[in-house]
Image (cartoon, rainbow, N blue to C red):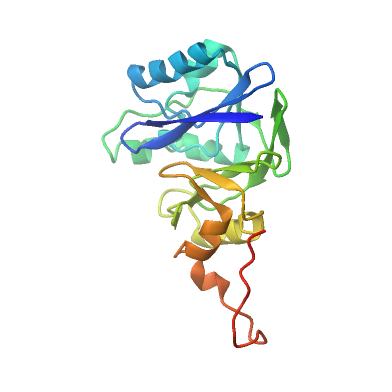
Amino acid sequence: MLNYKIFTVNPFAENAIVLWSDAGKDGAIVDPGCITDDELRTLTDFIGKEGISPKMILLTHGHFDHIYGVPALASTYGIPVYMSPDDAPTVEGNHRISRMFRLPDAPTAFETVPVKDGDEISFGDISFKVITTPGHTPGGVCYYDETDKLLLSGDTLFAGAIGRTDHFGGDYDKLIVSIMEKLMDLPGDVDVIPGHGPETSIAVERIQNPFLQPFNEPDEDMPEEGIPIRFE
């Protein structure tokens, strides 16, 4: 069984996530944007208290607010960092954004294990499938646990919103295609943990997300009484 704990960190209220399995307490850390020593300590203290054994760091993308804590945690636990190679330019270019917000430069000197669409990444008895969702960044990905019906959407999809595309490497058209073709076809009862903000579900975003509604127009040959809502 999958368990998780969300830590809201840094000035952008980013969701750093600790995942762990009941089977042996193996776990993973997702998007550790911890910018202060206190934020890192809160996360590592929780891991120690729960007896979790982190096996990897998973990055949904390489923006500075999602990676500040990567080097410290990778070193502390001696674990690999998984990220799409398409986001290497994002990591290298983070200073363009962080300095705009008068924040420290994010780390760039850490090695990553490349992921691609369809990869399966496992720890304990938990398995996540990699879904590539370019748009917010060129190498944005989501991680999907089909068994536990959980999607880690990073900054691709939020509760009632979508990721911004006006920063370096962003592409609005690609983001919409990623969401509509790869996420909206998931079962409606899949829970979603985004990179910022509250949790949601695929069903809720299908029918309530205002950024997606223009793309859900009925076909011309649909009956006048409307389209039945599909939840899964």
Q: Is residue 139 visible?
A: no
Image coords of residue 132 (percent x, y): 64, 47
In the rendered image, residue 192, in percent from the top left (x then y), is placed at 54, 46
Along the line of sight, the residue nearer the viewer: 94 or 67: 67
Residue drawn at the location 44% of the way across and 35% of the way down: 15
Residue 68 spot, x, y in % from top left: 42, 27
| Residue 79, visible in the rendered structure | yes
Q: Position of residue 47 (x, y in %)?
A: 51, 16
* Quarter the C terminus occupies: bottom right
For this rendering, which residue is in front, 112 or 18? 18
Q: Nearer the viewer, residue 180 or 167?
A: 180
Asked where in the image residue 224 lies, by quadrant, the reply is bottom right
**Relative height, residue 152 to residue 134 (above, below):** above
Specify the quadrant that holds the N terminus. top right
Relative height, residue 192 to residue 121 (above, below): below
The mark tally for this picture is 0
Left or right of 83 in this view: 66: left
Question: Most extreme residue toward the left, as rendered?
Answer: 102
The residue under the point 60% across, 50% down is 133
Q: Nearer the viewer, residue 231 or 219?
A: 231
What's the residue at 50%, 36% (across, down)?
62
Image-quadrant location for residue 78: top right
